[in-house]
């Protein structure tokens, strides 16, 4: 055997074809069972969303955004809509502010249900793929009742929202909330108390809060380290309604990794994210005021925008999601759009997180960060 361990190394491509790679392509250098180098490679899922936005008018752009991550469509479209509202100087009605917030939090719950079912299944707990995915159907049914679509909802629009609440859509949303609240204790037992899940996730993919902040992580991945960093509290959006309810930023204080987190802690954190979203929705539903759902001047003002630039952002399911928009005078479409999704940082943090772990643990580390390819390959 050679004296240099790298002489025994083998390069393995994980993805993009692997079912657990979700469109990513990561080159791993392994020696035996251990990874010594990780080289993330984005680009295999690229759909040129930023360029497409240059050829869509200001009411069509949100449709491009939501297709970057339809799992959280109500959240994904908001940064673009917010940027347009700033340039066009639109006034969002109070009713629309509350309705936006409610549906964003419902979208967050749905996305997390999808994630934890998929993540648990990739570790061999297949029942946890089926059960949460059945429960997310209740949310999808409520989305369809409200917007006519289960995923591509096209709900937020410059100046407000497109569709008003109905008695039936609210009833279906409440049914979805009742379902997930009833099931969460069962899911906690099935996952967090599972010896198999603990064995696969404890002390795997560990990093400190300082490292996470250095890598640009946000959302559940940094809150799992005990850092209460959340745009909903840190910089409340006046066109949303988070200030109308009483809630605290959910965080996880790891017992085994104080000031940091492992893959297990990141699962715990996402349960807390769902519980917080449920609380926000239940508080806001009785407070939905009467009135219009969109600025009556929105259509006229968004036909052509003045020259300007604006920055829209939202606390998405996977972290801070932002969009910078620049327009020319009397523009019918954006001059330039730049999207910054949260998964660029989480995916490239694998370069630091993975070396030293076993090949079998790569799926655990990768999945625990919940990276979605559309947020990077845009």
Image (cartoon, helix red, strand yellow):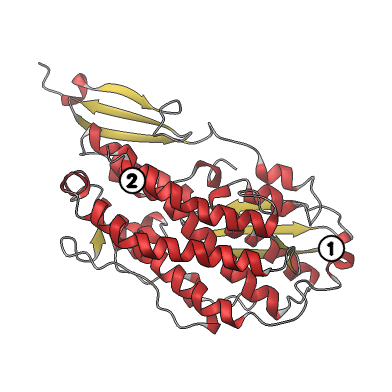
Disc sitting over residue 128 in the figure: 2
Decide if residue 232 is in sight here.
yes
Report the residue at 69% width, 73% height from top: 96
Report the residue at 70% width, 58% height from top: 325
In the rendered structure, which disc, 1 or 2, sits on the residue that comes first in sequence? 2
Looking at the image, residue 193 sits to the left or right of residue 147; the answer is left
Location of residue 75 (image quadrant): bottom right
Report the residue at 61% width, 49% height from top: 150
Image quarter hosting the N terminus: top left
User: Between marks 1 and 2, how big is the CA–CA gap?
Assistant: 45 Å
Report the residue at 37% width, 49% height from top: 116
Return the residue nearer the eye: 230 or 211: 230
At label 1, counting other C-alpha atoms closer than 10 Å, the crowd grade (few under 14, some 14-19, many 20 or more) is: many
Location of residue 14 (image quadrant): top left
Residue 67's x, y, as percent? Answer: 63, 46
Image quarter hosting the C terminus: top right
Q: What kind of element bears circle 2?
A: helix
Return the residue nearer the eye: 121 or 358: 121
Residue 179's x, y, as percent? Answer: 43, 61
Looking at the image, residue 366 sits to the left or right of residue 110; the answer is left
- Name the residue beneath numbered marker 1: 302
Q: What kind of element bears circle 1?
A: helix
Residue 25's x, y, as percent? Answer: 44, 31
């Amino acid at each position: 055997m050679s004296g240099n361990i790298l002489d025994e190394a083998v390069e393995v491509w994980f993805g993009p074809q692997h079912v657990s790679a979700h469109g990513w392509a990561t080159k791993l250098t392994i020696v035996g069972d251990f990874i010594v180098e990780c080289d993330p490679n984005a680009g295999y899922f690229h759909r040129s969303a930023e360029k497409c936005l240059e050829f869509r008018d200001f009411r069509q752009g949100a449709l491009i955004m939501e297709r970057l991550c339809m799992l959280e469509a109500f959240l994904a479209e908001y940064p673009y809509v917010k940027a347009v509202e700033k340039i066009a100087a639109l006034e969002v009605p109070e009713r629309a502010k509350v309705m936006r917030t409610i549906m964003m939090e419902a979208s967050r719950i749905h996305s997390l249900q999808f994630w934890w079912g998929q993540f648990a299944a990739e570790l061999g707990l297949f029942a946890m793929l089926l059960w949460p995915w059945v429960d997310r159907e209740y949310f999808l049914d409520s989305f369809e009742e409200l917007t006519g679509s289960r995923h591509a909802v096209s709900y937020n629009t410059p100046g407000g929202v497109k569709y008003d609440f109905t008695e039936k859509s609210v009833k279906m949303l409440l049914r979805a909330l009742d379902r997930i609240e009833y099931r969460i204790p069962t899911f906690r037992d099935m996952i967090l108390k599972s010896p198999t899940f603990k064995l696969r996730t404890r002390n795997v993919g560990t990093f400190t809060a300082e490292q996470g902040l250095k890598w640009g992580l946000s959302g559940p991945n940094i809150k799992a380290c005990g850092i209460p960093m959340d745009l909903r509290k840190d910089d409340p959006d006046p066109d949303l309604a988070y200030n109308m309810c009483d809630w605290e930023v959910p965080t996880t204080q790891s017992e085994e990794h104080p000031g940091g987190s492992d893959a297990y802690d990141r699962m715990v954190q996402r349960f807390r994210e769902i519980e917080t979203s449920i609380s926000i929705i239940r508080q806001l539903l009785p407070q939905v005021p009467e009135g219009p759902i969109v600025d009556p001047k929105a259509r006229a003002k968004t036909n052509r925008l003045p020259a300007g630039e604006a920055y829209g952002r939202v606390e998405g399911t996977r972290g801070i999601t932002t969009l910078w928009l620049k327009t020319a005078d009397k523009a019918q479409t954006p001059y330039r759009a730049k999207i910054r999704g949260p998964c660029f940082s989480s995916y490239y943090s694998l370069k630091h997180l993975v070396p030293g772990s076993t090949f079998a643990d790569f799926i655990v580390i990768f999945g625990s960060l919940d990276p979605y390819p559309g947020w990077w390959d845009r």
